[in-house]
Image: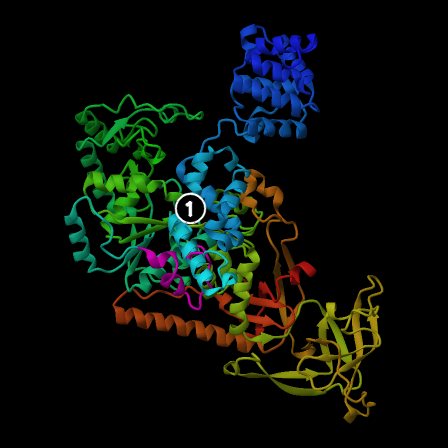
Amino acid sequence: MPPKPSPEVEHLAAFFAQCGLSQQRSLETARSKTAPQAHRLLQLANADSDNDNHSRLDDKQITLALQLAKDAQALTDDLRLYILDAIRDRRLAKADQVAAAIKYLTAHPEQPVDTASFNEACGVGFSITPAELDTRIRAYVADKADEVNKLGWAGFSKVSGLMRQADPLRWVAPLDLKGAAEAVYTDMFGSRDAHKLKAQQAADKAKKDNKAANAAGPKASTSAVPLHAESPDDMFAQGWLSRLHKPGGNEQKIPERMQEHLAWTKGKVFTRFPPEPNGFLHIGHSKAIAVNFGFAKYHKGHCYLRYDDTNPEAEEQIYFDKILENVRWLGYEPYQVTHSSDHFAELYDLAVLLIKKGFAYTSNDTAEEISAQRGGKDHGPRHDSKDRSKPVDQSLREFADMRAGKYKPGEMVLRMKQDMSSSNPTMWDIIAYRVLGKPHHRTGTEWAIYPTYDFTHCLCDSFENISHSLCTTEFIGARTAYEWLCDALEVYKPRQSEYGRLTLEGAITSKRKLLKLVKENYVNGWDDPRLYTLVALKRRGVPPAAIISFVSNLGVSTSPSLVQLQRFEQTVRSHLEMSTPRLNLVLRPIKVTLENLPADFQLSLDKPLHPKDPSMGTIAVPFSRELVIDSDDFRAEPSKDFFRLAPGATVGLLNVPRPVTYVRHETDPATGAVTHVVCRYEDEALGEQPLAPGFKPKGWIHWVSAPHAVAVREARLFRRLFKSDNPGALGDKYLDDLNPDSLEVVKGAVVESAVWRVVRDSLSRAKDVVRQRQDEATRNRTEAPPSVDGLEVVRFQANRVAYFCLDGDSVLQDESGEVDGGKLVLNLIANLKEDKLKAK
């Protein structure tokens, strides 16, 4: 028999039993090492409570309280009682939450406790929709892409285990998390059973062939592995896009609808790019443009540019203009340019039909009441609107009154009668029409009401006979409502397919946040080259073909992509490497005199515009007695690790037959800055002593002939606008993350005179491209696209410095019309190497 408990243990056991523990559990707790701490904590709780019953806890709560007593000894009594109260009122219901509460209050011991922050840190009231959970898991998997793709299903247990420890996934019910994660893995790697069968077959074959070393595990699906694209079309020939349904493969509720669809499309692919004209497009949209236009082009189909212009409060003409310009700049021409507003009358008629069929009703519920019907902030039980059973005739009258302007905004809406018991929030009687009372840029004051995106999008897809409605994964949840509405109205139903969106490291894409940056002058307009709007990338000189190549190289899958900035920059560099001529640009000039050359000395040197592409031709470079070199290439104090010009040094000049040797230098008396370096040109024909046999300079520097140098009014050097990799995750504190050194304006730079040849050739080539597109439009009997290029087409590699383009602020002609009278403004496109700017 076990020994009889001591009186002290018996006293503690009786106390714990009063608190709600069973007799056996009370005795076990009384004998534990943490019994005194648990006793003190619960005594404090009793003293703090006005009602004895309030202090009683159920078995689960007592377990959490004991965990608190054991692990929170470093906290003050007040903070421990705060956590205990959260256990009592069931805000904290799991061990993980209690552990998070202890961790939070240890880091934030100040009182009173910030309840909102505490709740967030502990997962209090946490809820997540299926679509949000899917997006979170895909983001986590994308972040662990190397390991996930390498191991496939074999690594599922490890990855899902780590996933359960990550915020906010740690608060998801384990079975829900496991099920959603398995769905993502199935999408990426095929079914788990197929994986097991394939792995077993591989193992059997390896055993049979005695080559076990070659059976290292299952192959990852091509949908999960970004493939290197030899051409932009590769992303349509393989991976996720290659597995989409064929035209006619989307099932219909009414089979006749498919027959009508195929008769109209003649079996061709039809897609659409449907931006809202309420802001400027950004780098993420380049993927949507490439996917929708490229997929249609690859299959010899057509892609619409459809403006989703159903919110006149936020739409401006400049957005319409720039969206079309961006599409054309990226190399695509819309099949047709359409607007959701083209269909306002038809959409209204279908809304009336939806009411008549009993699938919609008018409602004067407030936003707060609608939220409460959907479970409210606490995600409680859902219930129907009081208006859901309203007679059809009444809804028809009130909807007509909405159109006639008899209601103010917020007084009446039209809601779809869907399925309030569904787990999908897009089926909770979402709004189809609302009163705005604002004039529309195309329809004027004809309409006081406007359809919502959820009502408009699928029906416009249907009107335009879209075969593939391609969108990003945040719309996965909306697919149910999309299909429900088409079926309810018995119209042709396109198939929506979702791919992972593109997010670039260090880039802000929120329209609200971008607007604040522009309006409050943190940047110099929407086309500030530090931004990642498409107009900004265009102004920075990023070639549109490089953007398409970047998207193609990433591949298209259902996983979202947070791509490292250096990967984007490397794609741009790779494109520029073989497509831009090379010139000498001196950013911060120092005058150099070759004292042993005559004052009128001039030598013409021939050099290729690109050493690896003879088709670019050659240029004649003047070499004279007076030169300029970059201040970075001279150091008044020599050192062993510096191989450029310095006292006692001999260096080579790019493309010059003989090296030069330092003689002396001069400085500014006021600042001490070096202003002039005197050198000797090492040419035996000038009577100089020959250099040692086989002598080769250790350093080579670039230069420009001073008498022939072309002045650069400004050279604009750009660094990352934000210091962190994901400024969008900082909420409204993203402004605190701005890099104060993101823009450096260098004045006084010079470039060699061949820049004018590059300017003329580049602008001429751009005009040729426009003519080719106009000729193509004539052959196809379509609208001829105008030129969408500017001076940014003038791009060159500044030897040993970076890639640059001309900014639109440049002036290429003087008052007499002479080109050489220009004032150049240069924009940095990209550095020659990823770490060039960091080193500086």
Give the total number of marks visible in the rendering: 1
Q: Is residue 288 above or below residue 106?
A: below
Per the image, is 235 magenta? yes
| Residue that extends furthest to the left in the rendered view of this protein | 256
Q: Residue furthest front?
A: 1
Quadrant in the picture for the N terminus:
top right
In this rendering, is residue 612 above or below 225?
A: below
Lateral position of residue 364 relative to residue 749, left or right = left
Q: Position of residue 592 (x, y in %)?
A: 76, 76
Percent coordinates x, y for residue 671 in the rendering: 82, 61
In this rendered view, identify the residue nearer to me: 772 or 52: 52
Q: Position of residue 490 (x, y in %)?
A: 18, 42
Q: Is residue 252 left or right of residue 440?
A: left
Secondary structure found at label 1: helix
Instruction: Magenta stretch: give its range.
Output: 219-244
Prevalent SS, magenta region: loop
Quarter occupied by residue 311: top left
Q: Mark 1, residues whose alpha carbon is within 10 Å: few (<14), some, or many (≥20)?
A: some
At horizontal 37% and vertical 43% (from top left) the residue drawn is 476
Question: What residue is disc 1 on?
Answer: 184
Q: Is 59 placed above or below 357 here?
A: above
Most foreground residue, 40 or 196: 196
